[in-house]
Amino acid sequence: MAVHKLLLLPGDGIGVEVMAQVKRVVKWLDTQGLASFAIEEDLVGGAAYDDCGAPISEEAMTRAAEADAILLGAVGGPKWDGVPYALRPEAGLLRLRKDLHLFANLRPAICYPALADASSLKRELVEGLDVLIVRELTGGVYFGEPKTITNLSDGQKRAVDTQVYESYEIERIARVAFDLARTRRNSVVSSEKHNVMMSGVLWKEVVSSVHGADYPDVQLRHQLADSCAMQLVRAPKQFDVIVTDNLFGDILSDVAAMLTGSLGMLPSASLGPMEEVSGKRSALYEPVHGAAPDIAGKELANPIAMIGSLGMALRYSFGLGEIADRIDAAVAGALAKGYRTGDINAEGMTLVGTQGMGDAILAELERVN
Ligand code: NAD
């Protein structure tokens, strides 16, 4: 059996608490002989700053580069509010994203039937929802130059951000989306604003050309980003994979996220380019939520987003989609039995803490084993 090199970076606040539940699931998979892991663990964020004066050490960066996948909890907290900007906890995460060239951000929005009433939309619109947003993460308007504020002679100021994409950046994110669609319901919506933006014109052209050349079996539809946002709240179940740029992806993924209820439920993945010889790609998996200092240390955090991030690592880095399905089923089972952490609690349910939710998910894994 292949041994998967997994680097755990629990980070700060509830990152440490939710990662503890992932460790239990990993251990269970190992003892059942379902998967084999070589686990390493290191510090990131404020914890790393306290230890070595930097938000991630060079040794941890080396381990990250060598790992098959990285699982990160969360970084940050008021304790580090005063540290120099370049050394703030978030800088550790940004360095990982930058040095590992993690250009593809995957944000699934899945609505478990047991939680459909927690959504801001009607149950029938979201029950069984399974959308995957593929966001370009290293280009576009957040990084484009020039990026300035200048003083004008008439006393006014002018701010400039630059939306810039080169065709290779669009092509590689389009390939990620098409490849993923083939493992799902085989349908991609590409979202941009080609009616008013030249980058949108190029985006549409490149996505169409990649599709025509290599993915004619996948259904492709182009949709303007504003219309896509509207459809996401009107009838979200029409979508399978949505591929979009950094700016629109930032917004659309948050819209999709809220359809599912709580921040504590949302995993994510960030993937780097595929190495040609080894076929390997760097990958970082993390919950969408932060370190939640308001509940840290109280065993109140929902571990499902973190456990879902492990599921994504199994699916996208280790080729263990069946085991990922079992983890998803165990989460759905624990929820169906009424177990709830505080963030998703409702009347008549059984309130549990972080460990209690871990117990419920492990019990479901045992049950369906
Ligand atoms: P947050 O996501 O940490 O928390 C927002 C709210 O959601 C809080 O009320 C929190 O208690 C709740 N929440 C979040 N995750 C939860 C979970 N798993 N279970 C139950 N409730 C949960 O965002 P914030 O409060 O804006 O930021 C706190 C710190 O985390 C800041 O230092 C911020 O910079 C950092 N942050 C880090 C990341 C990351 O590591 N990727 C992401 C966002 C924020």
Image: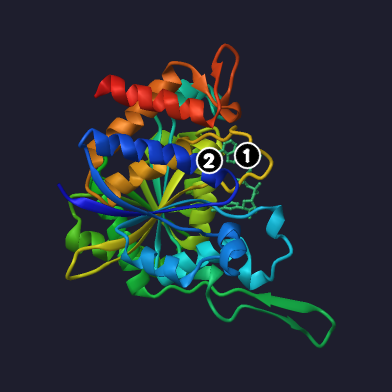
Residue where numbered disc 2 is placed: 17
* Residue in the foreground of this view, choosing between 343 and 194: 343
Image spot of residue 329 (x, y percent): 33, 27
User: Is 317 left or right of 61, judged from the image as shown?
Assistant: left
Image quadrant assignment for residue 236:
top left
Can the viewer see residue 85? yes
- Could you say whether the residue bearing mark 2 is in a helix, strand or loop? helix
Q: Are marks 1 and 2 in contact (CB under 8 Å)?
A: yes
* Residue in the foreground of this view, choosing between 213 and 303: 303
At x 20% / y 56%, what residue is drawn? 215
Q: Residues within 10 Å of mark 1 (few under 14, many from 20)?
A: few
- Amino acid tagged 1: Gly
Where 161 sits versus 137, above or below?
Answer: below
Q: Residue furthest right?
A: 155
Where 303 sits versus 142, above or below?
Answer: above
Image quadrant assignment for residue 109:
top left
Can the viewer see residue 307? no
Task: Identify the mark nearer the N-term, 1 or 2.
Answer: 2
* Residue in the foreground of this view, choosing between 162 and 40: 40
Colour scheme: rainbow
Question: How many numbered circles does the render carry?
Answer: 2
Image spot of residue 73 (x, y percent): 49, 49
Image spot of residue 229 (x, y percent): 51, 46
Q: Residues within 10 Å of mark 2 (few under 14, many from 20)?
A: many
At x 70% / y 67%, what residue is drawn? 83
- Amino acid tagged 2: Glu
Where 260 sits versus 123, above or below?
Answer: below
Per the rendering, the mark at residue 297 is: 1
Specify the quadrant that holds the C terminus. Answer: top left
